[in-house]
Amino acid sequence: MKSISIIGAGPAGIEAAAILAAHGMSVSIFEKSESPLSNITDKAFLFPNFADANDLAHKLAEKLKSPSITQHLSTEIVSLSRNGKGWTLKDNKGQSYSSDLLLLATGYTPFDAHRKEELGYDIYKGVVTSLDMERMIRDKAILNSIGEKPRRVVFLQCVGSRDEKSGNHYCSKLCCVTAVKQAIELKKQLPDTEAYIFYMDLRMWGQHFEELYRESQQDYGVRFVRGRISEASGTFDGRVQIKAEDTLMGLPLKMTTDLLVLMVGMEASVGTRCLAKEAGICGEYGFAQSIDPHMDDNLSAQEGLFLCGTCKRPMTIADTIADARSAATTILSLA
């Protein structure tokens, strides 16, 4: 019976682990956090159908109960190397683990909004990230900096994506629809609150995404402004003043808002960057590089080392799970 180590207990790692275990493989899954699925459990609802994120997390966590899966939580893998025909992993405590095959599912990390200092994150209390807003929505506690229900909320797209200053020229793929989803959720909880979305261009590429965009305007009164916010500053009453340009009108714009929500993009996680570099499969922007994005997207240039999920590029949760199933099928066909 072949053994496989999977680094990362997110949706990709867990879905692949469950399939491989069901087909007779001995699976060890490693997660640096105390619990799996941290990038799902910090969400409220999922687009495009507003499914409860906790329900999906519970269904995925149930798949870890297979007797063929050994979990190693609070275990950060810091190095990997070939060992004959297999692989040896070492964690941050110096312990080593060996297996025949290895699957990298180390995922992503949200862009650090502190790097966009001009937008005032962690400087002005009314500036929050999309993850902060997700928690507010989940806890039904959407409040401004002085603990009151906001009268106006502004969402800003492409923070840390498609941005030369941050060094990320790529689109993070999820921010447009996430802003629309969050604006709808905001209006459901606080119908009288104004919601604005500032965008460069809207990339509503997925099934039902365009319908969600139309619904946000027609049914919830969400307003869209084509333009970039150049600067945010605090006001004496705890609100946030933004300076922007309406690029459709070609005019400068000033607006005061109770909350400015920065839609942060996706970057390669620290684990992805370090392990991909060590394995010699580091691609653009620190993501892991597959052999070919069309026919061999789960294969790496290293024998016995496979890839799945957002360690390769930004993906939706649905795409991540589908990619994990593809990886498992690839591994089973070659094992």
Image: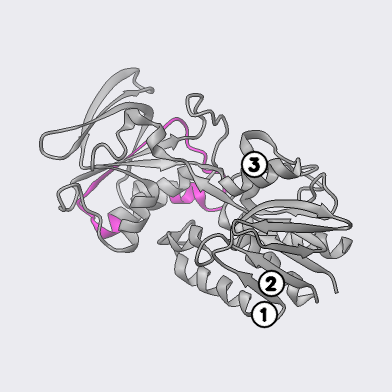
**Mark before the other along the chain sequence, 3 or 1:** 1
The segment highlighted magenta reads: 187-212
Query: Could you say where residue 40 lies in the image, as x and y percent from the top left?
Result: 49, 61
Residue 214 visible in the current orientation: no
Does residue 18 sit above or below 84 in this rendering?
Answer: below
Q: Is residue 62 left or right of residue 218?
A: right
Mark 1 vs 2: CB contact within 8 A: yes
The residue that mark 2 highlights is 18
The secondary element bearing badge 3 is classed as loop
Q: Quadrant of the image for the N terminus?
A: bottom right
Q: Callout 1, which amino acid?
A: Ser
Secondary structure type for disc 1:
loop
- Secondary structure at numbered mark 2: helix
Q: CA distance from mark 3 to mark 1?
A: 30 Å
Compare residues 150 and 91 and report the one nearer the observer.
91
- Counting residues from the start of the chain, the first of labels 1 and 2 encountered is 2
Decide which of tag 3 and tag 2 comes sooner along the chain.
Answer: 2
Q: Residue at x 34, y 51 (%)?
A: 132
Spot occupied by residue 10 in the image (x, y as percentages of width and height)? 58, 61
Looking at the picture, tell me which residue is in the foreground, 63 or 180.
63
Pinpoint residue 283: horizontal percent, then vertical percent: 69, 37
Query: Would you name the residue on which mark 3 appears?
Result: 287
Please report the residue visible at 23 percent of the width from the left and 55 percent of the height from the top: 191
Q: Which residue is mark 1?
A: 66
Local packing at callout 3 (Cα closer than 10 Å; few below 14, some 14-19, many 20+) is many
Cα–Cα gap, marks 3 and 2: 24 Å
